[in-house]
Amino acid sequence: MRTAVQIAAVALLATLACASQRGPVYPDFAAAAPPIAPGRARLVVYRTLYTEPMGFDAQISVDGAAVGTLPPGTWLWVDEPAGPHRVDSPLWPAYSAFGNQLPTQPVTVELPPGTTSFVSVSLISPGPIEVGLQPVSIGQAQNDLATLEMAPPADALE
């Protein structure tokens, strides 16, 4: 559940974005991000620029609820109650109906209160597309996220 502060922060940060419908690069967001509410934690899920196929946008869900879609070179964030959470990438019906996407192996991420945790998205595509999810360290994530932009709102992709 997004709070009014979180929605306002996203709107403010979106105005800092370049002409595309994507948002700011992660370091700019991190410098201006709203504080994490007590008893909650932040989850950042990202996909680097070089994850083929470029035309495939990975859907992301947390505990079964859709939270966004990741084109190449983007990231998204959600604040959740502290504790374990299941991150997944549901099948796109258009791909999976023809056997072109395999089910994703979900990952469980422990979100300690007041912290930010990171999950990297990779795509394996020598045949059917398979979305891989991997929790990563803060150091690795900050390196990967240095030039990635916030994913566009879901309605901008339709």
Image: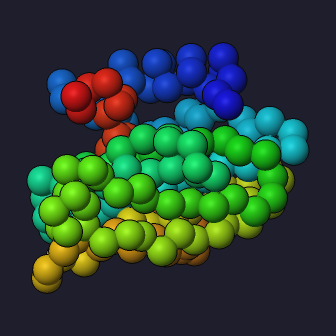
Residue 38, position as x, y percentages in the image:
87, 39
Image quadrant occupied by the N terminus: top right
- Give the tally of numbered discs: 0
Image quadrant occupied by the C terminus: top left
Q: Residue at x 74, y 39 (%)?
A: 36
Q: Residue at x 50, y 60 (%)?
A: 88
Report whether residue 18 is seen: no
Q: Nearer the viewer, residue 36 or 84?
A: 84
Decide: is 146 above or below 151: below
Q: Residue at x 38, y 69 (%)?
A: 103
Q: Nearer the viewer, residue 120 or 64?
A: 64
Left or right, 118 with reference to 120: right
* Farthest bottom residue in view: 126
Left or right, 52 with reference to 101: left
Q: Quarter of the image holding residue 50?
A: bottom left
Residue 44, position as x, y percentages in the image:
53, 53
The figure's colour scheme reads rainbow
Report whether residue 131 is seen: yes
Q: Nearer the viewer, residue 102 or 57?
A: 102
Left or right, 29 with reference to 150: right
Decide: is 121 above or below 55: below
Residue 26, position as x, y percentages in the image:
43, 47
* Farthest front residue in view: 97
Decide: is 146 above or below 135: above
Decide: is 150 above or below 12: below
